[in-house]
Amino acid sequence: MPRLLGKEVERKQATGDNLAEIRNYEPPEYEIKTKQAQVTRKTLHPTIIDELKSKYSIRKLAKKTGLSRNTIDKAFQGELIQPRSWELLMKGL
């Protein structure tokens, strides 16, 4: 899992007279949470995708829901989309 190192140095250490204290300072480490975003995202059911495709073109659906065509295209391919986008597409039925 990738880790990010913080570049912050405490003001006391940055302005201190002792150079050894600055050299021994280890910056804080932060971990990236990748699974958190996947939990909140949703996919459309294949039958709903077929129903939307039969009723609307991507362009008309984008105009009706206010979503971008790229988002609708992702939803039609069965990829994960944001919950708000999912709700707007479900209202489009």
Image (cartoon, rainbow, N blue to C red):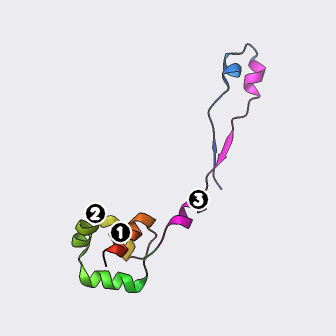
Residue 33 image position (x, y, % from top left): 61, 56
Is 11 placed left or right of 84 in the picture?
right
Q: Which mark is residue 34?
A: 3
Q: Secondary structure at mark 2?
A: loop
| Sooner in the amino-acid sequence: mark 3 or mark 1 | 3
Viewer-closest of 70 and 87: 87
Check disc 1 and report the residue beneath it. Answer: 88
- Distance, label 3 to label 1, CA atoms, is 25 Å
Viewer-closest of 53 and 29: 53
- Distance, label 2 to label 1, CA atoms, is 8 Å
| Sooner in the amino-acid sequence: mark 2 or mark 1 | 2
Viewer-closest of 31 and 81: 81
Quarter holding the C terminus? bottom left
Q: Which residues are magenta?
A: 19-42
- Distance, label 3 to label 2, CA atoms, is 28 Å
| Sooner in the amino-acid sequence: mark 3 or mark 2 | 3
Going by the numbered disc 1, the residue's amino acid type is Leu
Front: mark 3 or 1: 1
- Contact (CB < 8 A) between labels 2 and 1? yes
Residue 90 image position (x, y, % from top left): 37, 75
Please tell me which residue is depicted at 23% across the width and 76% down the height of the picture.
Answer: 57
Check disc 2 and report the residue beneath it. Answer: 66
Is 53 placed left or right of 46 in the picture?
left
Q: Quick check: can you spot residue 82?
A: no
Q: Quick check: can you spot residue 32?
A: yes
As drawn, which residue projects farthest toward the top?
17
Q: Secondary structure at mark 3?
A: loop
Going by the numbered disc 2, the residue's amino acid type is Gly
Please tell me which residue is depicted at 48% across the width and 71% down the height of the picture.
Answer: 42
Going by the numbered disc 3, the residue's amino acid type is Thr
Please tell me which residue is depicted at 34% across the width and 74% down the height of the picture.
Answer: 91
- Where 83 falls versus 23 (above or below)? below
